[in-house]
Image (cartoon, helix red, strand yellow):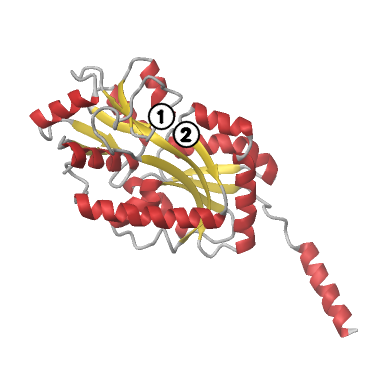
Amino acid sequence: MLGFALLASAAAAFAQAPVYPAKPLRMVIPFAPGGTPDAQMRIVAERLNPRLGQPLVYDYRPGAAGSVGMEVAARATPDGYTLVAGTVGAWAVNPHLQSHGFSTLTDLAPVVLVATAPAVLVVHPSLPVHSVQDLIALARKRPNTLNYGSTGVGGFGHISAELFSAMTGARMTHIAYKGAAPALADLVGGHIEVLFNSAVVTVPQIRAGRVRALATTGARRLALLPDLPTVAESGVPGYENSTWTGIGVPSRTPTELIQRLNREFAAVLALPEVQERFSAAGASVVGGSIDEFRTFLRAEYDKFGRLVRETGMRGGSAS
């Protein structure tokens, strides 16, 4: 009788437990609205929200190249209702540049790797350069007089420019922003001259003639811009740098909830229509398992730690 009573009690408790998710999920976007993570999450959310039965609610927390938003997520209640869409800079680079009192490796748990994408190197149309070699020559002639924007210290644009500088000797001055959209707006407005920025927010401005594209940072040309060469093709052999977006949750989030989120995100990312929309924005969908993302994240963290040490990357002039 005692065993039956215990079983009955457990069954009753299970029946009363709320089904997850029972309320909207907060998606922390660690950059200003309009950037790559924001655009990608809106594509995913159209198919994810019906699967979860609850909407993603966006919480924009820009600052410190994504570290402000990453910390907000890391310190949130680990109940499966707070997620963060972090980028390579926020996850794997900025921790080597600035101390924020939390760890992206231990205080956040990986959920899924969403997508990878190269940047596009663009300049203001008034700048008298029409190729990567033109830009290198001008930057060498006028060291630290050209201003390039980024999403902040350790952000993807900062990484790309520092790597470019280290490989070419093109010294430029770093201007940090709180997101890709405001950086691009200042390039269009002529307040900065150079920007390494994601295709998803840059291509419309390229097509409108408001900025001039010189190259893409990927290993291969973008299908979106097939006539645009890579930086490597443009006389900088070996240059390659791509950003990525990954989903994380507070590290103490129950395993079963992380697994549920991984399954739902992976299912959405496997949809042909979603992959087509990412491709149209210059990105490649990844998906995959939690362990695959964890292994990838560790490798990226170590790789960019070496880059920071070897280049002396910092928040001021590219060196």
Q: In the image, residue 24 lies at what x, y percent?
A: 62, 47
* Amino acid type of the residue that numbered disc 1 sits on in the rendered structure: Ala
SS label for mark 2: loop
Q: Residue at x 14, y 27 (%)?
A: 137
Are discs 2 and 1 less than 8 Å apart at CB?
yes
Q: In the image, residue 145 lies at what x, y percent?
A: 12, 31
Which residue matches tag 1? Answer: 199
10 Å neighbourhood of mark 1: few (<14), some, or many (≥20)? many
Q: If the image is split into quadrants, where does the C terminus sit?
A: top left
Which residue matches tag 2? Answer: 283
Q: Earlier in the sequence, mark 2 or mark 1?
A: 1
Number of numbered tags placed on the structure image: 2
Depth order, front residue of 145/215: 215
Residue 68 shows in the view:
no
10 Å neighbourhood of mark 2: few (<14), some, or many (≥20)? many
Q: Residue furthest left?
A: 141
Residues at marks 2 and 1, CA–CA distance in whole angstroms: 8 Å
* Amino acid type of the residue that numbered disc 2 sits on in the rendered structure: Ala
Depth order, front residue of 19/44: 44
Q: Residue at x 39, y 61 (%)?
A: 103
Q: Residue at x 31, y 33 (%)?
A: 196
